[in-house]
Image (tube, rainbow, N blue to C red):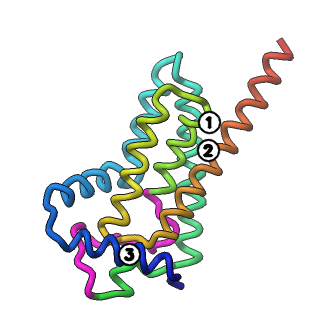
């Protein structure tokens, strides 16, 4: 079901992406590719896991990404929402057609799961991760492969899961400190 906000946001991005701003097209394609399957965030979690100083952040990131992937995949399978270009055949795509359904956005959920871990742990890179995550989310709208509600709910799923994982970690780590 497509609502009024979804249609207006879609119309806005279709009008921009059809203007032929080749530099903007390239930037948005870059950020979408960066967010494909959460590879950039998976790589970040692996790098964080290598170093003892950042290992706990890497664990939080990896767990948040895995849970977000699971929840988003289940929801995509259950909801099976059509993508904008499947509903409106006049939409020009700048990227290959994604094979999964539209709701929720996997790119947005992974990006905001990563951002959430950095934000809720008050990591000094949280603003940079927000910027990258937001541009990944925005790219999905610009490239007309998602409705606004797909990326909104995807982002909220990622934030909620990362918040939950950080809160659980905080409780566990405080119990360990009290036991010692």
Q: Please tell me which of labels 2 and 1 falls first in the chain.
A: 1
Q: Which disc is residue 120 wearing?
A: 1
The secondary structure that dominates the magenta segment is loop
Say which residue label 2 marks: 162
Q: Nearer the viewer, mark 1 or mark 3?
A: 3
Would residue 87 be counted in the magenta stretch? no
Q: Are marks 2 and 1 in contact (CB under 8 Å)?
A: yes
Q: Residue at x 23, y 78 (%)?
A: 92
**Figure check: 112 above or below 171:** below
**Mark 1: which secondary structure?**
helix
Image location (x, y in percent) of residue 75: 58, 69
Q: Residue at x 38, y 58 (%)?
A: 138
Q: Residue at x 86, y 16 (%)?
A: 179
Q: Quadrant of residue 142?
A: bottom left
**Mark 3: which secondary structure?**
helix
Q: Which residues are magenta?
A: 90-107
Alpha carbon separation for disc pair 1 and 3: 31 Å
Q: Which disc is residue 179 wearing?
A: none
Say which residue label 3 marks: 10
């Amino acid at each position: 079901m497509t609502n009024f906000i979804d249609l207006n946001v879609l119309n806005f991005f279709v009008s921009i992406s059809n203007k032929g701003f080749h530099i903007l097209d390239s930037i948005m394609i870059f950020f979408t590719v960066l967010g494909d399957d959460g590879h950039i965030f998976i790589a970040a979690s692996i790098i964080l896991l290598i170093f003892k100083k950042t290992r706990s952040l890497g664990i939080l990131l990896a767990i948040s990404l895995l849970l977000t992937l699971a929840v988003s995949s289940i929801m995509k399978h259950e909801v099976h929402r059509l993508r904008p270009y499947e509903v409106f055949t006049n939409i020009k795509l700048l990227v290959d057609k994604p094979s999964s359904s539209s709701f929720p956005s996997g790119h947005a959920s992974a990006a905001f799961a990563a951002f959430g871990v950095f934000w809720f742990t008050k990591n000094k890179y949280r603003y940079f991760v927000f910027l990258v995550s937001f541009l990944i989310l925005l790219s999905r709208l610009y490239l007309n492969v998602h409705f606004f509600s797909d990326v909104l709910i995807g982002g909220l799923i990622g934030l909620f899961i990362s918040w939950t994982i950080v809160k659980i970690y905080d409780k566990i780590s405080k119990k360990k400190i009290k036991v010692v």
